[in-house]
Image: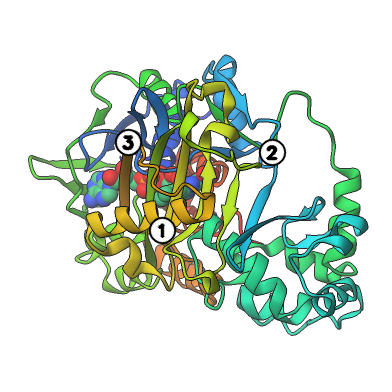
Amino acid sequence: MRPGNRAPATKRVIILGGGISGLVAAYELVKRGSPIEVTVLEAAKTLGGKIRTETIDGQVVETGPDSFITAKPEMLELVRELGLESELIGTGPDAGVDILLGGRLIPMPAGMNLIAPTRLLPFAFTPLFTPAAKLRMAFEPLRPVRRDGVDESLADFTRRRLGAEALERLVAPMLAGIYAGDPERMSVRSTFPQLLEMEKKGGLVKSLWWGAKQAPRREGLTMFMTLKGGLSKVIDALQRRLPPRCVRADCPAQAVRRRDGRWEVVTPNAVLEADAVIAALPASALADCLEGLDYELAMRLREIPFASTATSVLVYDDQKVPNRPKGFGFLAPRGEGLTVTAATYSSAKFPARALAGRMTVRAFVGGGGREGDAEGPITRLESRVRADIEKVLGLKGVVPLAQHTTRWIKANPQYEVGHSRRLDRLGSCLKGHPGLVLAGASYGGVGLPDCVRSGRRAAELVFAGSRRSHDAVRLGLA
Ligand SMILES: Cc1cc2nc3c(=O)[nH]c(=O)nc-3n(C[C@H](O)[C@H](O)[C@H](O)COP(=O)(O)OP(=O)(O)OC[C@H]3O[C@@H](n4cnc5c(N)ncnc54)[C@H](O)[C@@H]3O)c2cc1C
């Protein structure tokens, strides 16, 4: 056999979890055309995990993720590789997000990049911040740089660099949307490590301004993209690429154990043997499976907290909406006293798949520190959402044609302060279990591109028969 062309040591791989991370790992292994035999075990009856596309009142809606960021290329590359490029749609021209302030929708000033201003005039004239707060933000580049390496919360970091108003009116509501997290608890290092780099390179305002100037124009791409028929198309395409009988749905892994140097996965109907296991389950679900194998590892996995959220999709008759709101949606800071933390006008965000005569609003509820709102009775949740949307959009007495709510109970991993140390400890525990590789949103990134990257990396490690499979949990972290 020629050097560099050695057959991989691993022969049989079991993948736990049929969300995007697990399916990408399976696809990558199968794609190599190697002698590896892959089995995906999924507890639910359908694949996709958090990716769930449904049709409501004839309208394609997402009850989980609705799009992916294109600045991280992995998801876009996957879509293209799967032959779904013609399905790609971008966001509409009606860009922009409003922030609710004192019951009024105030447009986010143009050039507000991530969390700091990059354009002077829109920032100078916005009523979103008081003059004192604007001054505080403008002088951000002069703030001292923190170099002690302490893992700081996003709230502390924002207060220190930009002031309390930037936190309340901008960062906290934005974060609620992206990470479903409480900024007082979320780790800046594990959620936005790029902010720490920017701080070191002369401050956020300067780095973001420079970054915005230099950002390459990418033909035909918007910052967020999706698929016309919904993100589930990616899941269907991945499944089609896998051999028949490779996927076992409605087949939860109950325990993972070691016997005679091989792995065993216990399911309700059988005990399956493998040379390697890729665990693409939420950390909490994996902990249940590993309790008997390694108590400490299970405990470390349980240290990663999960928050509950809900999405509620409302479909309105266009004619009954007197003043069509501008932009893609709004963020509601906590002080506004709403149950809804944010909402997107899906029909404006993705006009290429909007139904004529309909306005679709996707409202978000819950998240770190506000979980009770998402976990309570669904009828109460739905009526609060209707009341909030009615109030904010001035829809007095307008009843939606349809409302569909999905609760995601303890489903959103929270990268709290100390998350990276937790991953280090997890990595140390995994050193004792070569061939057990972790993938998925619980560790190094919750976005779809992060999940695709983690699935790919897990497959690479297994394919290479790497003894460093514990490295997988460090993925995507600074
Ligand atoms: C409401 C919401 C909106 C979001 N919006 C966006 C967005 O717009 N853009 C974006 O990029 N990201 C978004 N995200 C995040 C993103 O959707 C997730 O991080 C990603 O889909 C997670 O994929 P995964 O494969 O790692 O995990 P999951 O999708 O959670 O998949 C894990 C799978 O494991 C299965 N499982 C659990 N236990 C067992 C067991 N014992 N045995 C076998 N199988 C088991 C589950 O049923 C599930 O199918 C959103 C998330 C939510 C909840």
Provide the residue designation for mark 1. Answer: 365
Mark 1, Cα crowd under 10 Å, few <14 / some 14-19 / many 20+, is many
Provide the residue designation for mark 2. Answer: 223
- Is 11 left or right of 46, judged from the image as shown? right
Amino acid on which disc 1 is placed: Val
Q: How far across and how far down the image is residue 388, in percent? A: 44, 57
Is residue 270 shown above or below 388? above
Which marked residue is nearer to the observer: mark 3 or mark 2?
3
Q: Are marks 1 and 2 in contact (CB under 8 Å)?
A: no
Q: Looking at mark 2, is its residue's CB closer than 8 Å to ligand 1?
A: no
How far apart marks 3 and 2 lie (CA) works out to: 29 Å
Q: Residue at x 78, y 24 (%)?
A: 219
- First of labels 1, 2 by sequence position: 2
Q: Nearer the viewer, residue 61 or 78?
A: 61
Q: Is residue 276 visible?
A: no
Q: How far across and how far down the image is residue 425, in percent? A: 46, 73
Provide the residue designation for mark 3. Answer: 402
Amino acid on which disc 2 is placed: Met
Q: Quadrant of the C terminus?
A: bottom right
Is residue 322 shown above or below 78? below
- First of labels 3, 2 by sequence position: 2
